[in-house]
Image: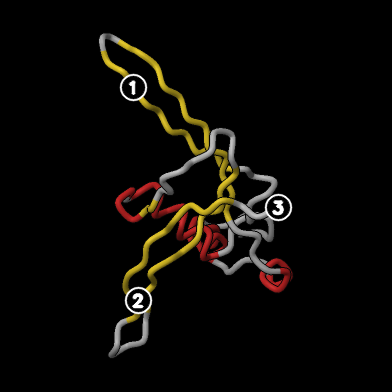
Amino acid sequence: MNAQTHSRSDLLKERQKPHDEAKEKAGCKGLFFRYRGNNYFHEGKLEFKKTFTKLKRKSCPGCNLCQSMEDDLGEDLELVIFPDNLTNEGIYELKVVNMTTDCETGYVDNWDIEFFPAED
């Protein structure tokens, strides 16, 4: 195998490496989303649609915590707490809340994620 050829296992190991230390030292920017709410009448029903679009430039490029929160969004929306008073076109930050740890091991075993209005 020459220097430019990589095996599949080498590529998988590369993907699993921690992010660049400079990015970690600079700190996580967090995950930011723009909320849009639509109400419309369709086939005899009044429907409400909530859309949260990730703001890529404002958000973290992908530290471990942010990646974990994004994975939770895709897997289980029951973990997500939405505020009652959402502002249309408002910007919201996703944060980890209600974090608990196992008393024997000290590892985090449960958490929720919540949308908070972003501070300017």
Q: Which residue reaches farthest bottom? A: 104
Of residues 120 and 16, the one drawn nearer to the viewer in this rendering: 120
Q: Amino acid at mark 1?
A: Glu
Looking at the rendered structure, the secondary structure element under dot 3 is loop
N-term-proximal mark, 1 vs 3: 1
N-term-proximal mark, 2 vs 1: 1
Identify the residue at horizontal 35%, vertical 76% (top origin). Answer: 100
Q: Which mark is residue 120?
A: 3
Badge 3: how crowded within 10 Å, few (<14), some, or many (20+)? Answer: few
Q: Between marks 1 and 3, how big is the CA–CA gap?
A: 32 Å
**In-image side of 113 versus 109 (left or right):** right
Which residue is identified by label 1? 47
Q: Amino acid at mark 2?
A: Thr
Q: Position of residue 51 (x, y in %)?
A: 47, 34
Q: Which mark is residue 115?
A: none
Badge 2: how crowded within 10 Å, few (<14), some, or many (20+)? Answer: few
Q: Position of residue 93 (x, y in %)?
A: 56, 53
Of residues 52 and 6, the one drawn nearer to the viewer in this rendering: 52
